[in-house]
Image (cartoon, rainbow, N blue to C red):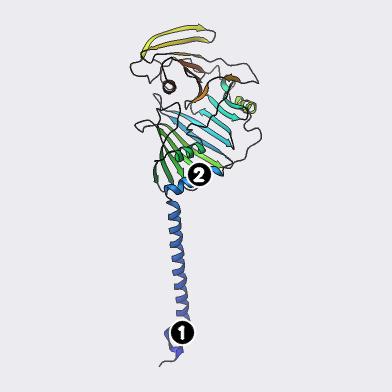
Amino acid sequence: MPALHALPFSRPYEIKGLERLKKSFALIVTVLMAVLVMAACGNKSQSDVVKGLDKKVESLNGYKAEAKMTLQTGSEPQVYNVEIWHKQPSYYRVSLKSADKEQSQMILRNDEGVYVLTPALNKSFRFQSDWPKNSSQAYLFESLVKDVMDDKKPVFKSTDSHYVFETKTNYQNNKMLPFQEISFNKNDLSPSVVKVMDQDRNPLVTVEFTKFQFNSSFDKDSFDMHKNMSFALLDVPANASANAEPFAVKYPLSLPDKVSLKTQKEIKTENGKRVIMTFGGKKAFTMIQEPAAVSPPSDAATPVSGTPADLGFTVGSLTKKSISWTNNRVQYMIASENLTPDELISVARSVQGQSAK
C-alpha cells in the first residue's frame, strides 16, 4: 500500500485546483439561480401584474409625467405635448400644448372645483364636476389601472420590457372609442404607451409617456388656479394675436348617416365674422364658429353649467343639447335636438385638422 504522501490528491497544487473547481461550480449555480429568479420576476402572471398595479395605486402619493399625444381624428395627425401632475387625493393639473401651433390649455382640479384655462385668450372656466372620476383618461395612471381592473376579460401579454393589456374603455359620452391598449414598464409599472382605438381597433389617440416619476413633491401653490394662470400667461407671445392664423372656416369630417350641409351664412361681427352652418337630416344640427375674443384681465373664472368634455386636443363644455370649445383662437359650438352626447363629441372631434373647403 503506497504511503499517504504519495497519493495524487495529497499534492498541494491539485488540492488548490479542486478548490477552484468547487468555487467555479458554486458561482455557476448562483448565476443560474439569479437568472431563474429574474426570469420569474419578468414573466409574472396576469393576476400578479394586476395585484402589483393595485398596490401601486394604493401606495401612491402623486406623480409627475410628460407625454406626447397624437390624434388621428382629423384629416392629418395632430401632436400635443402633455404635462401631468397629480397629488392625492384629488388634485390634478394637465397641461396641453400643441407641437406646431401657439396654443395651450390647462385643466386643473383643486378644492374649489374643476377649471379649464386658456391663456392665449386670458380665459378661465370653472365647472362643478367630478372630473376625472367615472371616465377613462388616457394620460392618468390611476385611471388606466382602474380600466384594467374593471375589465373582467382583458387581453394580456408580456414582452421583453412591458406588460400589455387590451381593455374596454369607460368613456361615458364617447362610445366611438371602445378599446384601448395599455403598456406598462416592467421595472416600475409606470405607463409607457396607451392606444385608444375605434371599433376596428384603429388607434385614434396615442399617448407616449417620455417621463414618469412616482411620489413627486409639489409646492403649496402647484394646483392654485390664479398661480397657474399667471405662469401660463408668461408663455403667451406678446404678439400672439397679431401673428394668429387667419380665420379659416372648417367643416366636420364625421357626420351621422344621411346628414349633409344644407345652408351656410356669414354675419359680420366686431371680431370679423361669424359662420353659421345648418346640417339637415334625421340627426340635424347647427354649427357656429367665429374668432374668439381675448378677455380683459380678471381674477374670477367664468362659471359653466355644462360638464367638461375631453376632445383630446382641448376640453370643451358639454350639455344635453350642445357642445362648445375653443381651439387655435376660434370659438366653436354645435347645437342639436337630435344628436346624443356621444354624437356631439364625435362630430366635434372631427372638426379639428380638417382643411377649409
Name the image quarter holding the C terminus: top left
Image position, residue 15 (x, y; %): 46, 79
Secondary element at image label 2: helix
**Residue 327 appears in the rendering:** no
How far separated are the C-alphas under marks 1 and 2?
Answer: 61 Å
Q: Crowding at label 1, few (<14), some or many (≥20) Cα neighbours within 10 Å?
A: few
Can you give x and y, in whole percent of width and height, for residue 285 in the image? 42, 14
Q: Residue at x 54, y 33 (%)?
A: 83
Horizontal and vertical percent position of residue 53: 49, 44
- Which of the two residues, 122 or 38, is positioned nearer the viewer here? 38
Q: Which mark is residue 10?
A: 1
Q: Is residue 63 above or below residue 32?
A: above
For badge 2, the amino acid type reads Asp
Of 42 and 356, nearer the camera is 42
Residue 214 sits in which quadrant? top right
Q: Position of residue 182 (x, y in %)?
A: 43, 39
Task: Give me the disc on residue 337.
Answer: none
Q: Given the image, on which type of amino acid does mark 1 rest? A: Ser
The residue sitting at 45% across, 62% down in the picture is 33
* Residue depicted at x 45% and y 28%: 172
- Going from the N terminus, do you reach mark 1 or mark 2 first? 1
User: With respect to residue 193, does 98 lie above or below?
Assistant: above
Q: Which residue is mark 2?
A: 54
Quarter of the figure with the N terminus: bottom left
